[in-house]
Image (spheres, rainbow, N blue to C red):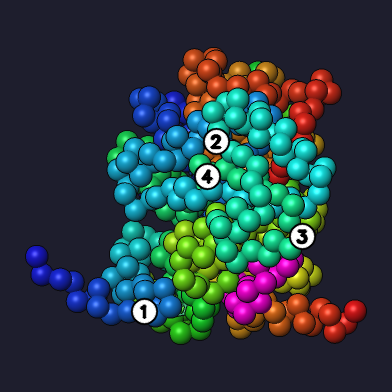
């Protein structure tokens, strides 16, 4: 069996999600980024999708013929950047 | 996807409870459809803390969880979905006072009576299990090695796969607007995409259960409360294997998530009843404070995500499961109060027994929907994951 070249194209470096993983899900009719995130873990790594979510939006646009602007990008949740727990504790003590 | 116009059973809600119920029903040969207003798992199920424990303090939850763990252990095989794995890594409750030790000892005696191998251990033994915990204030711990955790995304995917193979239909992005009935017999559902006729309907909408119930004039006390959770950056696996719990520090629960290796967990700060699910800064700070008391090394670990979901709470923190007397053919399994993921295998087996045979060998009376109006509340179950 020849290997699918799309398995070598990594879309999400944090969580090791390939182009094939994303396209297979879209082929099942799932085009909502929030759902694709939860099913493949794309965008849920330490960079929180800053690298990969725009790529995913592009793939959805290409495969569905939608315009990029029509694709709903998931809300960013706090913390916007990873913050060590110790730093958060520190802030708390400063105030008290 | 075109919808069927009739089925034997309509399950409303595609969370772990709806999907697992549909699985048992389809396996018994029933023609079943699941209707989900968003996508499967999008409710509380994909927001849960992944914990699965048998350390409860009453005969019913202990036996139900013993049965659930048997099923969780074999689920990958049962669903022919080997990606799903139950991680049997235990639950460790850290105890800081004589009162806590006394009440957990009582629970352990009851758990042992039903064959759960839990025991009270010393702080030093607890530290052998999780070397990173700070035991300076810990007086003892309640430990059960057969508790564990599992990935809800894989559980849902496995169930969806199995349902497909059993020819059961799951309709996403379809909302049930109303339960149709003639007199006191249910006849089907009206959805955002048309009607489906069925003589049996199961309300598995958990936090949303009251919306459909109220339209039928039914009042079961289930209310949505906002609870939150966090996940940190991943680090070396197996540093924090069990779920670690501390009532003293925020009612915190935390463990390394099975698939990613980041720490997943929460504390018992809640808001509600409310439909609002915005995350709060206060929660994040309380997490930081309490988690680093329990495991000081976590201060170096970055938090990467925080989210909120509903606990569908009842007054005694136990679910509402059973036949609805007022309408023939209407059943409910909702109000899981923060432990519906772990209970799903046995709770759904129980409700499906009741639907198909009118009774179950499992202690389902404990979850009787009418206990509230009779004033027979159960001892409050520990709510957290
Ligand atoms: C932060 C947090 C941590 C948790 N930790 C744990 C834990 O460690 N262990 C544990 O066991 N449990 C935990 N829980 C609880 C657990 O998530 C729930 O008890 C469980 O997921 C309930 O499953 P369910 O299928 O009943 O509900 P849900 O997953 O909420 O499913 C109900 C579904 O019904 C759908 N629905 C609603 N109304 C309609 C309608 N009218 N028509 C069609 N569909 C509809 C919803 O969209 C939803 O998908 C936690 C919960 C939260 C929020
Ligand atoms: S690259 Fe996908 S989350 Fe970081």
- Distance in Å between CA atoms under marks 4 and 2: 7 Å
Q: Secondary structure at mark 4?
A: loop
Q: Residues within 10 Å of mark 2 (few under 14, many from 20)?
A: some
Q: Secondary structure at mark 1?
A: strand
Q: Is mark 1 within 8 Å of ligand 2?
A: yes
The x and y percentages for residue B162 are: 34, 41
Residue at image mark 2: B117
- Say which residue appears at 38% left-offset and 50% top-offset: B84
- Distance in Å between CA atoms under marks 1 and 4: 38 Å
Q: Is mark 3 within 8 Å of ligand 1?
A: no
Residue at image mark 3: B137
- Identify whether B94 is placed above or below B374: below
- Distance in Å between CA atoms under marks 4 and 3: 23 Å
Toward the top, the furthest residue is: B358
Do tag 4 and tag 2 residues touch (Cβ < 8 Å)?
yes
The x and y percentages for residue B300 are: 62, 79
Of the pair B6 and A10, the residue shown nearer to us: A10
- Distance in Å between CA atoms under marks 3 and 1: 46 Å
- Distance in Å between CA atoms under marks 2 and 1: 45 Å
Toward the right, the furthest residue is: A96
Q: Residues within 10 Å of mark 1 (few under 14, many from 20)?
A: many
Residue at image mark 1: A11
Do tag 4 and tag 3 residues touch (Cβ < 8 Å)?
no
Of the pair B317 and B6, the residue shown nearer to us: B317
Mark 3 belongs to chain: B
Mark 1 belongs to chain: A
């Amino acid at each position: 069996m020849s290997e699918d070249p799309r398995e070598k194209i990594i879309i999400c470096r944090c969580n090791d999600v390939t182009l094939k993983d994303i396209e297979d899900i879209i082929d099942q009719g799932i085009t909502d980024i929030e759902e694709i995130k939860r099913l493949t873990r794309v965008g849920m790594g330490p960079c929180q999708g800053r690298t990969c979510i725009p790529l995913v939006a592009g793939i959805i646009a290409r495969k569905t013929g939608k315009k990029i602007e029509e694709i709903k990008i998931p809300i960013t949740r706090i913390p916007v950047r990873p913050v060590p727990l110790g730093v958060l504790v520190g802030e708390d003590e400063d105030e008290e | 996807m075109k919808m069927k116009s009739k089925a034997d059973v309509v399950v409303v809600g595609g969370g772990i409870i709806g999907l697992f119920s549909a699985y048992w029903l389809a396996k018994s040969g029933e023609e079943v459809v699941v209707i989900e207003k968003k996508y499967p798992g999008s409710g509380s199920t994909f927001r849960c803390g992944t914990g699965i424990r048998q350390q409860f303090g009453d005969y019913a939850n202990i036996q139900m969880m013993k049965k659930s763990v048997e099923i969780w252990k074999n689920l990958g095989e049962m669903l022919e979905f080997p990606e799903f794995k139950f991680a049997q890594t235990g639950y460790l409750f850290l105890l800081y006072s004589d009162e806590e030790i006394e009440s957990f000892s009582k629970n352990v005696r009851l758990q042992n009576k039903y064959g759960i191998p839990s025991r009270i251990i010393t702080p030093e033994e607890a530290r052998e299990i999780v070397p990173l915990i700070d035991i300076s204030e810990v007086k003892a711990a309640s430990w059960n090695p057969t508790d564990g955790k599992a990935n809800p995304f894989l559980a849902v995917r496995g169930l969806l796969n199995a349902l497909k193979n059993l020819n059961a239909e799951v309709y996403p992005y379809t909302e049930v607007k109303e339960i149709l009935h003639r007199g006191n017999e249910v006849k089907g559902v009206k959805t955002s995409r048309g009607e489906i006729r069925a003589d049996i309907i199961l309300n598995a909408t958990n936090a949303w259960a009251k919306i459909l119930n109220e339209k039928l004039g039914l009042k079961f006390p289930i209310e949505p409360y906002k609870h939150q959770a966090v996940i940190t950056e991943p680090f070396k696996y197996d540093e924090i294997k069990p779920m670690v719990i501390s009532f003293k520090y925020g009612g915190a629960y935390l463990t390394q998530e099975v698939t990613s290796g980041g720490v997943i967990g929460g504390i018992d700060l809640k808001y509600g009843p409310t439909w609002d699910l915005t995350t709060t800064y206060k929660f994040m700070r309380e997490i930081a404070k309490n988690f680093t008391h329990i495991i000081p090394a976590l201060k170096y670990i970055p938090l990467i995500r925080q989210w909120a979901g509903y606990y569908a709470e009842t007054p005694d923190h136990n679910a509402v499961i059973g036949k609805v007397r007022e309408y023939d053919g209407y059943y409910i399994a909702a109000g899981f109060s923060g432990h519906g993921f772990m209970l799903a295998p046995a709770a759904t087996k129980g409700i499906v027994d009741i639907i198909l045979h009118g009774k179950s060998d499992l202690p389902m009376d404990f979850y009787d929907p009418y206990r509230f109006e009779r004033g027979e509340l159960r001892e409050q179950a520990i709510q957290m994951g």
